């Protein structure tokens, strides 16, 4: 898309059309605003034509004004109201052009008819008004250049045909009326300049928006990368540290529990030595997937804490619930039944799990996030000391030393 935008911005002055699909996007964007603008100005033209009846009365007198008044009130006004109704609901550009063209041509025809029947000294006024109508409407409507050619060409043809065919130039000939007719073509230049400028602005705005979106997406990717372990795809230690602090603050504010579990894959070095690091990485990914399912089912967060060690944050986990969660994590790895190549026979990959839980109210005794980590670490050490492949729990102590990074 950016390449299309750059091509559009670099296009020559004589090429108004944008590369697809930018042209369709531009047309869809501008249709609604143009329709609203045309509707409002049609109301102004209705008021102007109604007031012009008084001018006709002054020029023609009471008897001769009947025809132009009837054409204005019974033909133009209803037609303009129908055009306003047709331009509701974000009318497409073609319908806008049709509405503008029909109302302008009818208004011009009524004005040219007034020039035909007006007393000699007033005919020139109506000829000028007949040329001003498409000039003003063309400037207001802001039609596309393609539609402006159709609109101005049709209005010019009507004007010239009426002036020449009905000999409205009078004894002085049609030179001056035809010169006045050139005013009808002025909106062509305005339409071209307007479309070029609005398309350039559209492209510049779109490019700026896309660059901003790309920057936002890149920042989001960087954020994900900074919070995700590249091997397993789960949260990394950095994100876990941030979530642990906020989860403990929530437990304090809500007077609730917060549980923690540390999981260590048993004899992982022997696995790597026997099978190689590629198989070791595959093992860690499968273990992470199993643990992630078990943790997220309890509304928690799983992170890779380092090497073959994982940590689970378990909000609202009471001491009983955190032990149950630890057993579920231990069971999730056992159910993988991954063969352990570092041992003979049917040995499979297992894990040691250490769990702990603390209530937010213990903050008054100085308990903090580091104390939960230290308690979970003590529990994990106890599980390893008691033969591994098991779950152990430990109580939180205030002022416990934090785990080493």
Image (cartoon, rainbow, N blue to C red):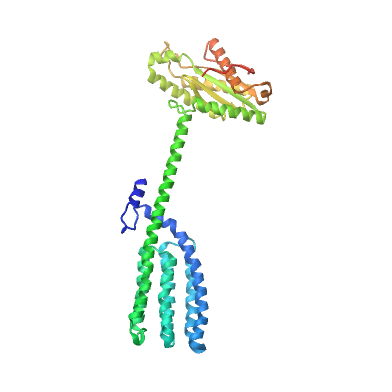
Which residue is at a point 41% across and 53% down the rendered structure image? 202
The reply to whether residue 323 is visible in this rendering is no
Residue 355 vs 194, above or below: the answer is above
> Quarter of the image holding residue 16?
bottom left
Residue 264 vs 21, above or below: the answer is above
> Quarter of the image holding residue 23?
bottom left
The reply to whether residue 80 is visible in this rendering is yes
Residue 337 vs 185, above or below: the answer is above
Which residue is at the front of the view, 89 or 60?
60
Provide residue 227's location: percent of width, then percent of height: 48, 29
Which residue is at the front of the view, 205 or 224?
205
Provide residue 162's location: percent of width, then percent of height: 36, 80
Provide residue 108's location: percent of width, then percent of height: 42, 77
Which residue is at a point 50% across and 66% down the rendered structure image? 40
Please give the count of numbered marks on the rendered protein. Answer: 0
Provide residue 348's location: percent of width, then percent of height: 45, 16
Given the current orientation, which residue lies at the most extreme bottom position?
63
Residue 225 vs 95, above or below: the answer is above
């Amino acid at each position: 898309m950016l390449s299309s935008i750059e091509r559009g911005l670099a296009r020559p002055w004589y090429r108004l059309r944008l590369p697809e699909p930018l042209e369709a996007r531009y047309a869809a964007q501008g249709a609604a605003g143009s329709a609203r603008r045309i509707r409002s100005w049609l109301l102004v033209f209705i008021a102007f034509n109604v007031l012009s009846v008084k001018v006709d009365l002054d020029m023609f007198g009471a008897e001769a004004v009947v025809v132009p008044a009837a054409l204005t009130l019974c033909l133009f006004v209803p037609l303009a109201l129908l055009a306003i109704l047709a331009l509701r609901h974000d009318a497409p550009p073609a319908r806008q052009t049709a509405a503008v063209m029909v109302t302008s041509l009818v208004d011009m025809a009524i004005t040219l008819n007034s020039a035909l029947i007006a007393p000699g000294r007033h005919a020139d006024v109506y000829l000028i008004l007949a040329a001003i109508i498409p000039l003003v409407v063309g400037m207001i409507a802001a039609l596309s250049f393609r539609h402006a050619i159709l609109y101005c060409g049709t209005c010019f043809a009507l004007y010239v045909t009426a002036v020449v065919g009905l000999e409205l130039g009078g004894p002085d000939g049609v030179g001056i009326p035809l010169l006045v007719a050139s005013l009808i073509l002025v909106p062509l230049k305005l339409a071209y300049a307007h479309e070029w400028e609005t398309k350039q602005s559209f492209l510049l705005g779109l490019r700026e928006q896309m660059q901003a979106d790309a920057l936002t997406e890149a920042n989001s990717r960087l954020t994900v990368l900074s919070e995700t372990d590249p091997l397993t795809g789960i949260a990394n230690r950095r994100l876990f540290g941030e979530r642990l602090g906020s989860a403990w603050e929530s437990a304090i504010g809500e007077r609730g529990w917060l549980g923690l579990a540390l999981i260590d894959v048993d004899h992982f070095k022997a696995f790597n030595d026997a099978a190689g690091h590629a198989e070791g990485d595959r093992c860690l990914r499968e273990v992470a997937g199993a643990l992630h399912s078990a943790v997220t089912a309890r509304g928690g967060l799983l992170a890779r804490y380092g090497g073959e060690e994982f940590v689970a944050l378990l909000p609202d986990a009471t001491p009983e619930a955190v032990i149950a969660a630890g057993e579920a994590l231990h069971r999730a790895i056992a159910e993988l039944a991954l063969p352990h190549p570092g041992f003979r026979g049917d040995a499979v990959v297992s894990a040691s799990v250490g769990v702990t839980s603390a209530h937010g109210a213990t903050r008054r005794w100085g308990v903090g996030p580091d104390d939960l980590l230290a308690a979970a670490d003590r529990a994990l050490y106890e599980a390893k000391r008691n033969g591994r492949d098991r779950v152990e729990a430990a109580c939180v102590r205030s002022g416990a030393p934090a785990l080493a990074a």
